[in-house]
Amino acid sequence: MYRFLLSRQWVILTLVGLALIPVMIKLGFWQFHRHEHRVARNDLVARSLAADPVPVTELTAPGRPVTRDAVWHRVTASGTYDTKDEVIVRMRTSADGKSGRWVLTPLLLADGRAVLVNRGWIPADGEQTKFPQIPAPPSGKVTVTGRLRADETDASGIKDTTGLPPRQVMRIDSERQAKALGRPVLGGYLELTDPAPGDSGPELVPAPDHSGIGPHMAYAVQWWLFAAFVPVGWFVLVRRERRDRAAEAARAAAGAGAADAPAHGTVARTASAPE
């Protein structure tokens, strides 16, 4: 009755189905882990943004990468801005999607070290090779508050480019800026939140959105449903194939009986005819 399952076509179909089930289950768990990672990231960002600010020197140091738990934590720093070594970070967008640049200014600390401060976004002008006119930061000693960020590396997805005009960079790298400054620079950088620069200054970088969790959980459920549908679909196809083969066999038998009926009738009439 089910001998057709041993045919080459059905053996291949069965093997493909058996291979797809674990693959789909694994893809479901991959999406589930991405969902968990997104939820954990949102929780971490929320806690960091809600925490009381601490001195930046407690969370980072020269040559030391900013840890995952320290990213987005609110920090404070006191010193004087070094505008002569200020640089701009190219190809950055504002909160409403406009093209522009970030203003990165070193803040010189009392102990001789420095921390890079992202003072915010400015629009891109028509001349990209010249250093733009940037509103000056407060003079003298200041205390700033901001979000701690990690250095931008290849993992950030931002492509680095050499040969840029003076005082222009593609991504923020504290070690590279330390060489340019000739002094130790704390790892990572500070994304300024306070004091606000005012209407004439750069536009502050907005806080990260940590409300959405993305579609990963829905994708995980879809993959697991697909995995469950494989054996169900295989069973439905087997039942349909068996029914179709049974119907075809019945039609063949009926056709053979109809073809044999006249021959038997002729033989009977011939045998009974008088001589």
Image (cartoon, helix red, strand yellow):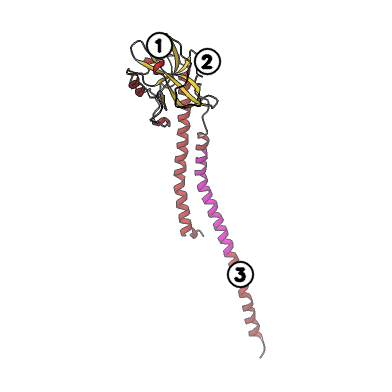
- Quadrant of res 164: top left
User: From which residue to which does the magenta span run?
Assistant: 220-249
Q: Main secondary structure of the magenta part?
A: helix
Distance from Cα at disc 3 to Cα at disc 2: 94 Å
Between discs 3 and 1, the one toward the N terminus: 1
| Viewer-nearest of discs 3 and 1 | 1
In the image, which disc is placed on residue 255?
3
Residue 11 pos. (x, y %): 46, 56
Using residue 78 as the reference point, say whether residue 249 is left or right of it.
Answer: right
Residue 150 pos. (x, y %): 40, 23
The residue located at (58%, 63%) in the rendering is 248
In the displayed orientation, state which residue is furthest to the bottom. Answer: 275
Q: Secondary structure at mark 2?
A: loop
The residue under label 2 is: 200
Distance from Cα at disc 3 to Cα at disc 1: 101 Å
Residue type, mark 3 in image: Gly
Q: Locate the C terminus by quadrant.
A: bottom right
The residue located at (64%, 84%) in the rendering is 270
Between discs 2 and 1, the one toward the N terminus: 1
Residue type, mark 2 in image: Ser
How would you rate the neighbour count of disc 1 (Cα within 10 Å): few for under 14, some for 14-19, many for 20 or more? some
How would you rate the neighbour count of disc 2 (Cα within 10 Å): few for under 14, some for 14-19, many for 20 or more? few
Q: Secondary structure at mark 1?
A: strand
Distance from Cα at disc 2 to Cα at disc 1: 20 Å
Camera-side residue of 32 and 178 = 178
The residue under label 1 is: 80
Residue type, mark 1 in image: Thr
Using residue 3 as the reference point, say whether residue 108 is left or right of it.
Answer: left
Using residue 254 as the reference point, say whether residue 203 is left or right of it.
Answer: left
In the displayed orientation, state which residue is furthest to the right. Answer: 274
Between discs 3 and 2, the one toward the N terminus: 2
